[in-house]
Image: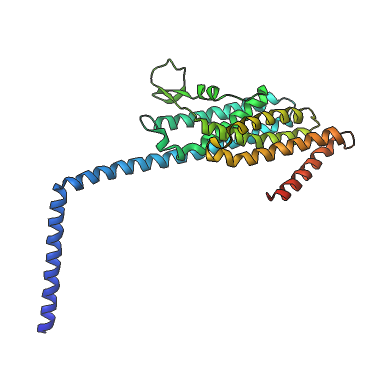
Amino acid sequence: MIAYFCMVSGEGWSRRNAEAAQERDALANSSSPVIAAFKVFQQELDTRHDKYERLVKISRDITIESKRSIFLLHRVTNIPDPEVVLNEAESKLDGVRQKIGQIAEELRGEDIYQFHRAFTPGIQEYVEAITFLHYIRHRSLISLEEINAKLVFMKTGNGLAEAPPSSAHVLTFQVTPADYLLGVADLTGELMRLCIGSVGNGDIDTPFQLSQFLRQIHDGFSYIGNTGPYEVSKKLHTLRQSLGKVEDACYTLRVRGSEIPKHMLADVFCTRTTHMDTEEGVV
């Protein structure tokens, strides 16, 4: 009985000592300048983390809508009036630009490169979509300056709206040269698919136009070499693959085009493309 009483008394004494120690620590912490400074750091890091996560979510939305625009643009080879598809894709990209305006709002007063990895996938996908649309419509490559000129927004009470640079409360977003180059590198894959789709519909002129255009892009990337971003050198291999497939299609058209019926050309190219990918270890 005495032993039990001593044990209970000891536990109570230990508990009281622990509570007293916690009270002393709390009192000391509340008056400690170090703890106060770290609380400020905690709030700053939490705010920055929340902003980063919001940018990641916006980037995902931009990627999804840009991909939908690209899929839509591939229909231009299957319909009699391509302008209908082009206008619809332009409308979708207007919505994408509004989401980029949300990124500009989040980055106002911030260092863009601290959050660049959060939104760069979406921006690259947007560049791929807008360059694809521009090529189909104008048969040329849109410049970085032209892309950035469309990313000027005016903050209003109802949200964001595209506005001229002279308007008040203007927000701007600048696509970086690296994101532009990576988006253009991805564009070459879509142009290769456009080439195969065009041949399937009996258009034998588009592959030769695409071949010349892709050679120009390849030459431009070759000038960059190893001096550009690391991701550019990785995508250069894919660019060469796309160029090789388009050149192979042009070779087949030039040499064997008269032997193969037009409705079978696409099947021949798809078979040859799969064979090339297997040899290179892609499939």
The answer, for residue 96, to whether it is visible in the render is: yes
Looking at the image, residue 199 lies above or below residue 234: above
The answer, for residue 69, to whether it is visible in the render is: no
Q: Position of residue 6 (x, y in %)?
A: 10, 79
Please tell me which residue lies in front, 199 or 224. Answer: 224
Q: Residue at x 40, y 40 (%)?
A: 52
Q: Position of residue 231 (x, y in %)?
A: 55, 40
Residue positioned most to the top: 166
Q: Residue at x 33, y 40 (%)?
A: 47
Please tell me which residue lies in front, 168 or 132. Answer: 132
Q: Residue at x 89, y 33 (%)?
A: 258
Looking at the image, residue 273 lies above or below residue 145: below
Q: How many marks?
A: 0
Q: Position of residue 247 (x, y in %)?
A: 75, 35
Q: Position of residue 11 (x, y in %)?
A: 15, 72
Position of 120 with respect to 75 (left or right) is left
Position of 1 with respect to 279 (left or right) is left
Position of 28 with respect to 60 (left or right) is left
Display colour scheme: rainbow
Where does the N terminus fall, quadrant-wise? bottom left
Looking at the image, residue 52 lies above or below residue 94: below
Quadrant of residue 39 within the rendered picture: top left
Quadrant of residue 213 within the rendered picture: top right
Residue positioned most to the bottom: 1
